[in-house]
Amino acid sequence: MEEFLSTHVYSLMHWPWFAALASYMLVGQVAKTAVFTKDRAATHRAWQWGRRTLALHPLVAGLVTGLIWHTPEASVSGWPASSAYFALAGCCSVFAYEVLKGVGKKHGYEITLPGTTSYPPPTTEELQRILETAGAPIDESSNP
């Protein structure tokens, strides 16, 4: 029991880092797909630079969060340490999203966020072809 508590209580002490990682992950993917789009990058130079520097956005967001929140946990105090703490969370958020997306894909889930495009549903002809290759009977009465 002591081993369980020491392991899990220790990880709970780092809740600000995990919360920052999750929020940077979500906000970054929404910004990538809805704010800094390729279409907007073609319209204005500011959007173009915003799109080109997407890889730096989590790092900068972490640095700014560290400037605002000086003591996220007991062992991290002062703005330089706090900025590095949150900047690391920002950098790891990109890696964490890719891992989450890969694990989801391995288990048959497609992670999509608001503003992202998804695959269109198959047409009636494609559905009939899929059902015929699977050997399933085709019910014409339910076909619109």
Image: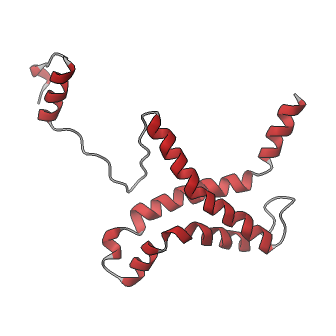
Of 143 and 32, the residue lying toward us: 32
**Screen quadrant of the N terminus:** top right
Task: Relative to 27, say whether 109 is above or below.
Answer: above
Compared across the picture, whether 5 is left or right of 143 comes to right
The percent coordinates of residue 9 (x first, y second) are: 82, 41
Furthest-right residue in this view: 2
Residue 112 visible, this angle: yes
Corner quadrant of residue 56: bottom right
The percent coordinates of residue 96 (x first, y second) are: 58, 51
Of 65 and 89, the residue lying toward us: 89
Task: Relative to 144, say whether 35 is above or below.
Answer: below
Rendered residue at 87%/59% (across/down): 74
The percent coordinates of residue 83 (x first, y second) are: 73, 70
Task: Relative to 54, say whether 2 is above or below.
Answer: above
Rendered residue at 20%/38% (across/down): 122
Q: How many marks?
A: 0
**Screen quadrant of the C terminus:** top left
Q: How is the image coloured?
A: secondary structure
The percent coordinates of residue 132 (x first, y second) are: 15, 22
Residue 69 visible, this angle: no
Rendered residue at 82%/45% (across/down): 10
Rendered residue at 83%/63% (across/down): 76
Compared across the picture, whether 36 is left or right of 128 comes to right
